[in-house]
């Protein structure tokens, strides 16, 4: 079910394409660069509760999108080439990079064959703790907690809260509330809170977190591919804004060192976990620079301009909403048409605080 806000945004993109506004914006954006952010790539599924659906695309959409980029004369570049092109204040060609966060195991099954067939470069950002089996997939565990129960009680910021979530709409609402709250906590407190929720509502956090990312053998295959760039996304994928500076530096340095040691390659590129403005700070940008990374990508929506003076430690990305499958909407977004970031929920809020 589409929320009215998402339906309105989709309609706006279709109108922008059909009216020619997207083409006009595209002409004005000549010479600008785009970095696309994807996460899961896998076939669609019919689970009734999918609060993270916007983070997924199908392999069929990826295939169609790459075909379209070639047809639209985009230069598909590696992150190294993006950094070089971004510092050149000349040129009119549109250029783009394809990036994938999370290093999920579905990448090797569904995304990598598509990328290989098209022979296009790509970057994948790896949280090494998950590959080592020590990461906590708290977003997936939260999904399972909310999906399986109709009443949830917990202590939030010192106050006891009780929620009645007997229908799908209220479950989406509650997932958003709890997701935002957990993400606002320091990493240790987040671990305690999600652990407590999982114990009380019968979700095995270790099982949920197991085998969701690539193996080191998978990454070794990518390391041998000249079209692949393997970047660092820390060890544990924490919200850096809520993490002490010494711990942030350790997450960056250790994640990079683990990748370089395991794969026998240089790791020059970084992605801020989550990457929006609520998840990292200028301090973290400075630490990424001091750590010696050549680039760092965020999830702040935007384009790389034509002035040749980008901040390579804070490159913007367009996080594609996988609920959109229209190539017309895809082209409208890439044209530079501004679209307000949508809320995660797919239905209108109907939470019952009881």
Image (cartoon, helix red, strand yellow):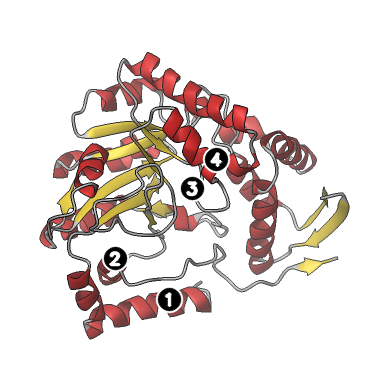
Comparing labels 3 and 4, the label whose residue is closer to the camera: 4
Q: Is residue 265 left or right of residue 138?
A: left
How far apart are the two marked residues, 2 and 4, measured between alpha carbons?
34 Å
- Which residue bears the numbered disc 2? 330
Comparing labels 4 and 1, the label whose residue is closer to the camera: 4
Q: First in sequence, mark 1 or 3: give its number.
A: 1
Q: First in sequence, mark 4 or 1: give its number.
A: 1
How far apart are the two marked residues, 1 and 3, measured between alpha carbons?
22 Å
Comparing labels 1 and 3, the label whose residue is closer to the camera: 3
How far apart are the two marked residues, 3 and 2, measured between alpha carbons?
21 Å
Residue 74: x, y in percent? 15, 56
To which quarter of the image does residue 93 belong?
A: bottom left
Is 79 drawn above or below residue 290 in the view shown? below
Comparing labels 3 and 2, the label whose residue is closer to the camera: 3
Q: First in sequence, mark 3 or 4: give its number.
A: 3
Is 323 drawn above or below residue 315 in the view shown? below
Disc ID at residue 275: 3
- Which residue bears the numbered disc 4? 283
């Amino acid at each position: 079910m589409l929320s009215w806000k998402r339906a309105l945004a989709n309609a706006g993109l279709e109108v922008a394409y059909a009216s020619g506004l997207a083409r006009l914006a595209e002409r004005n954006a000549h010479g600008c660069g785009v970095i696309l952010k994807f996460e899961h790539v896998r076939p669609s599924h019919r689970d009734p509760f999918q609060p993270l659906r916007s983070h997924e695309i199908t392999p069929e959409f990826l295939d169609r999108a790459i075909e379209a980029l070639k047809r639209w004369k985009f230069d598909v570049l590696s992150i190294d080439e993006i950094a070089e092109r971004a510092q050149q204040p000349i040129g009119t060609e549109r250029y783009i990079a394809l990036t994938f966060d999370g290093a999920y195991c579905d990448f090797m099954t569904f995304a990598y064959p598509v990328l290989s067939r098209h022979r296009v470069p790509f970057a994948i950002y790896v949280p090494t703790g998950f590959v080592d089996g020590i990461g906590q997939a708290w977003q997936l565990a939260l999904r399972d907690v909310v999906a399986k129960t109709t009443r949830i009680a917990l202590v939030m910021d010192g106050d006891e809260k009780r929620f009645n979530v007997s229908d799908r709409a209220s479950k989406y609402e509650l997932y958003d509330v709890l997701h935002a709250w957990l993400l606002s906590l320091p990493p240790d407190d987040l671990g305690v809170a999600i652990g407590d929720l999982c114990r009380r509502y019968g979700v095995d956090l270790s099982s949920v977190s197991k085998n969701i990312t690539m193996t080191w053998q998978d990454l070794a295959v990518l390391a041998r591919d000249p079209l692949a760039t393997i970047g660092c996304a820390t060890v544990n994928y924490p919200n850096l804004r809520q993490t002490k500076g010494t711990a942030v530096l350790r997450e960056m340095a250790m994640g990079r060192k683990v990748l370089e040691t395991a794969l026998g390659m240089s790791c020059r590129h970084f992605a801020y976990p989550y990457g929006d403005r609520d998840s990292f700070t200028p301090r973290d940008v400075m630490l990424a620079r001091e750590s010696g990374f050549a680039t760092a990508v965020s999830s702040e929506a935007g384009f790389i301009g034509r002035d040749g003076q980008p901040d390579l430690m804070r490159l913007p990305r367009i996080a594609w909403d996988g609920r959109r499958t229209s190539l017309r909407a895809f082209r409208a977004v890439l044209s530079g048409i501004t679209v307000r970031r949508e809320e995660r929920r797919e239905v209108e809020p109907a939470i019952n605080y009881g």
